[in-house]
């Protein structure tokens, strides 16, 4: 395996790169050296293979770990631990499945994956995906490693009970990541070219080692790439900058605890030039001293007098739309519920509304004048009543005699 280039160097990524960076670098290079773009160019073809091989290893956590530890030796044939890159179902790993509509003139079997790993080949899906980005060969949209929509994010917002019923506009101070305008999201300072790494002189390797072994290790400064880029001064090389925004958010009528209000394009930044994700505002509705809300129905309680309950009455009841007069029929019991149709919370995003349930509670006077007391006794003599007659239960047998 002598003369093999360091995989990190091949992809031009630092050793500390995460999966995303590696994938991004791979796709960029694969496009550049793709055989369809460079017909008949043997050098490009060789590079293309090299890139694919490097990606196969670095995109696989296990293989990458082996590689980091042992270098190319990890993949030499005849190894005893059974680790064989390219053995089995092809040396290249793609998350996406094989797709149809391959671009004409390109046969994936022309290109081997792992040159030294056996009969590895590109999975069909992988190229289609790349090709679709290059030539627009597929209309089904982007694969997972093409331009990707940014992450959807969410934030919680407290909403007044009333605002939840009627809707409102609210101000939201949002801090989110957007692509850096200075470097166009590349992370490299504009107008600067990558220069040879001063630590390794461009080889990406540093000679060294301890004890009896002399080991070339990957240059920590350039991560094996052999060159260093000047980080964009605006974003520090990340390609993204934080942006503080004050948004006016429309909260529609009917939101409840856990309702989600979507703000398109206000989520995480897109990947590989993809659109940004969405922001979801999750509402939390504050409690109200008078109303209780269950789904879209509102519940309230109204006290009435014994006389009103017995004789019937018209009572004023607060609703979300103001006072309405509710008829209490004669003989109403304490705890009885009456429904006011359509006086509940509006259905979110739909026509109509829930109902309001009004529970009456007979309020008993806590102190009475002598005159009122005698009037009540007089009443009782006129209307003898045993409200407990219908209970039909006289206690548990085992509880007998306990009292
Ligand atoms: Zn920048
Ligand atoms: Zn270096």
Image (tube, grey):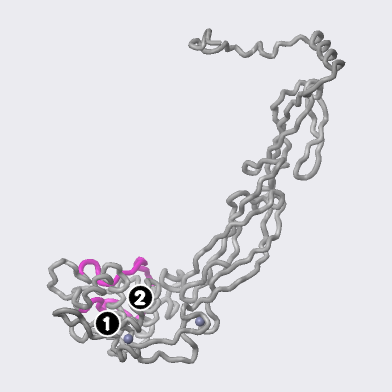
Whether residue 294 sits left or right of residue 271 in the image: it is right
x%, y% of residue 312?
81, 24
How crowded pointer 2 is (Cα within 10 Å; few <14, some 14-19, many 20+) is rated as few
Is 290 drawn above or below residue 129 in the view shown? Answer: above
Q: What element carries label 1?
A: loop
Marks 2 and 1 in Cβ contact (< 8 Å): no
| Residue at the (85%, 16%) spot, across then down | 370
Instruction: Provide the major secondary structure of the magenta segment.
Output: loop
Could you say which is closer to the camera, residue 264 or residue 173?
173
For the C terminus, give its image quadrant.
Answer: top right
Comparing labels 2 and 1, the label whose residue is closer to the camera: 2
Which span of residues is magenta-colored? 87-115
Label 1 CB sits under 8 Å from any ligand 2 atom: no
Residue 341 in the image, given as x and y percentages of width and height: 72, 38
Q: Foreground residue, 78 or 189? A: 189
Residue 1 appears left or right of 37: left
Residue 16 image label: 2
Ligand 2, by image quadrant, is bottom left
| Identity of the residue drawn at 43% across and 91% down | 193
Q: Is residue 166 above or below residue 311?
A: below
Instruction: Pinpoint residue 69: horizontal percent, then vertical percent.
Output: 23, 73
The x, y position of residue 246, in whole percent, is 65, 68
Which residue corresponds to mark 1?
6
Identify the residue at image location x=81%, y=38%: 324
């Amino acid at each position: 395996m002598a003369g093999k280039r360091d995989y990190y160097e091949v992809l031009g990524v630092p050793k500390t790169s995460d999966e995303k960076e590696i994938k991004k670098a791979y796709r960029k290079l694969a496009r550049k050296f793709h055989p369809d773009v460079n017909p008949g160019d043997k050098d490009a073809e060789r590079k293309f293979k090299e890139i694919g091989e490097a990606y196969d290893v670095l995109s696989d956590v296990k293989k990458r770990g082996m590689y980091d530890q042992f270098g190319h030796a990890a993949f030499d044939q005849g190894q005893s631990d059974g680790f064989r890159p390219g053995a089995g179902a092809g040396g290249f790993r793609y998350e996406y499945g094989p797709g149809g509509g391959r671009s004409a003139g390109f046969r994936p079997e022309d290109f081997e994956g792992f040159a030294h790993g056996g009969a590895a080949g590109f999975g069909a899906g992988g190229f289609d995906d790349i090709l679709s980005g290059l030539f627009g060969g597929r209309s089904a949209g982007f694969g997972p490693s093409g331009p990707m929509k940014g992450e959807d994010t969410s934030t919680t917002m407290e909403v007044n009970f009333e605002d939840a019923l009627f809707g409102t506009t609210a101000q939201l101070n949002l801090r989110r990541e957007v692509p850096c305008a200075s470097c166009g999201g590349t992370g490299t300072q504009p107008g600067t070219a990558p220069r040879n790494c001063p630590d390794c002189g461009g080889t990406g390797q540093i000679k060294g080692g301890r004890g009896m072994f002399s080991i070339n290790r990957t240059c920590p400064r350039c991560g094996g790439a052999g060159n260093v880029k000047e980080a964009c001064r605006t974003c520090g090389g990340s390609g993204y900058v934080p942006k503080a925004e004050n948004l006016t958010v429309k909260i529609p009528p009917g939101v409840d605890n856990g309702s989600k209000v979507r703000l398109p394009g206000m989520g995480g930044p897109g990947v590989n030039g993809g659109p940004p994700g969405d922001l979801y505002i999750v509402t939390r509705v504050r409690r109200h001293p008078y109303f209780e809300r269950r789904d879209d129905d509102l519940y309230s309680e109204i006290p009435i007098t014994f006389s009103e309950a017995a004789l019937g009455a018209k009572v004023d009841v607060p609703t979300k739309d103001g006072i309405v007069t509710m008829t209490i029929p004669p003989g109403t019991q304490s705890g009885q519920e009456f429904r006011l149709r359509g006086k509940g919370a509006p259905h979110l995003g739909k026509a109509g509304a829930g109902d309001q349930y009004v529970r009456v509670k007979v309020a008993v006077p806590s102190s009475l004048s002598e005159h009122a007391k005698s009037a009540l006794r007089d009443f009782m003599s006129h209307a003898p009543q045993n409200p407990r007659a219908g209970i039909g239960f006289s206690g548990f047998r085992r509880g007998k005699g306990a009292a």
